[in-house]
């Protein structure tokens, strides 16, 4: 019984010890998912706040180093947000469509 209790405690500690980088990637993913789900419902002010939040995520990206898998995930998130911006306002993002 003591052995199982020790194993359970070790698992809880191990699971709860997420690195700052992993938490950042998870938070960025949640942000992108929410943006994709609700961008049509945002008012102009809410959209501006969303863009500012994205820029904040981007500025934090430059302060961290990522392995290849993490970098690919972040690249995917950035591409998804670019598509959201284009869908939200195609005329103001006309040059982004051709990149």
Image: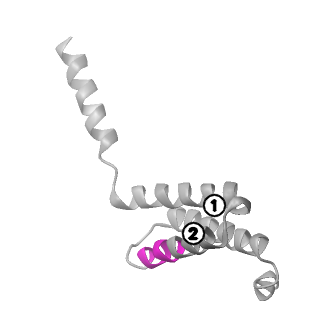
What's the distance in space between the residues labelled 2 and 1, CA to CA?
8 Å
Q: Is residue 78 left or right of residue 89?
A: left
Q: Which residues are magenta?
A: 54-61
Comparing 24 with 38, the one in front is 38
Comparing 36 with 78, the one in front is 36
Query: Residue sitting at 40 percent across and 56 percent down?
Result: 23
**Residue sitting at the far bottom:** 95
Query: Residue sitting at 60 percent across and 61 percent down?
Result: 32
| Residue 67 spot, x, y in % from top left | 46, 66
**Sequence-first disc among 2 and 1:** 1
| Residue 47 spot, x, y in % from top left | 63, 70
Give yes or no for contact between labels 2 and 1 (Cβ–Cβ under 8 Å). Answer: yes
Quarter location, residue 95: bottom right
Please tell me whether residue 10 is drawn above or below residue 82 in the rendered image. Answer: above
User: Tag 2: Cα neighbours inside 10 Å, few (<14), some, or many (≥20)?
Assistant: some
Quadrant, the N terminus: top left
Q: Secondary structure at mark 2?
A: helix
Q: Is residue 23 left or right of residue 93?
A: left
Residue behind mark 2:
50
Q: Secondary structure at mark 1?
A: helix
Residue behind mark 1:
35
Please tell me whether residue 53 is drawn above or below residue 35 in the rendered image. Answer: below
| Residue 22 spot, x, y in % from top left | 41, 56
């Amino acid at each position: 019984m003591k052995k199982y209790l020790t194993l359970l405690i070790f698992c809880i500690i191990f699971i709860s010890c997420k690195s700052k980088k992993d938490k950042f990637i998870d938070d960025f993913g949640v942000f992108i998912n929410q943006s994709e789900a609700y961008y049509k419902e945002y008012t102009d002010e809410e959209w501006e706040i969303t863009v500012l939040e994205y820029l904040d995520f981007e500025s934090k990206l430059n302060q961290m180093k990522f392995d290849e898998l993490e970098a690919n995930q972040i690249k995917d998130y950035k591409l998804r947000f670019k598509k959201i911006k284009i869908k939200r306002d195609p005329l103001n993002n006309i040059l982004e469509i051709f990149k």
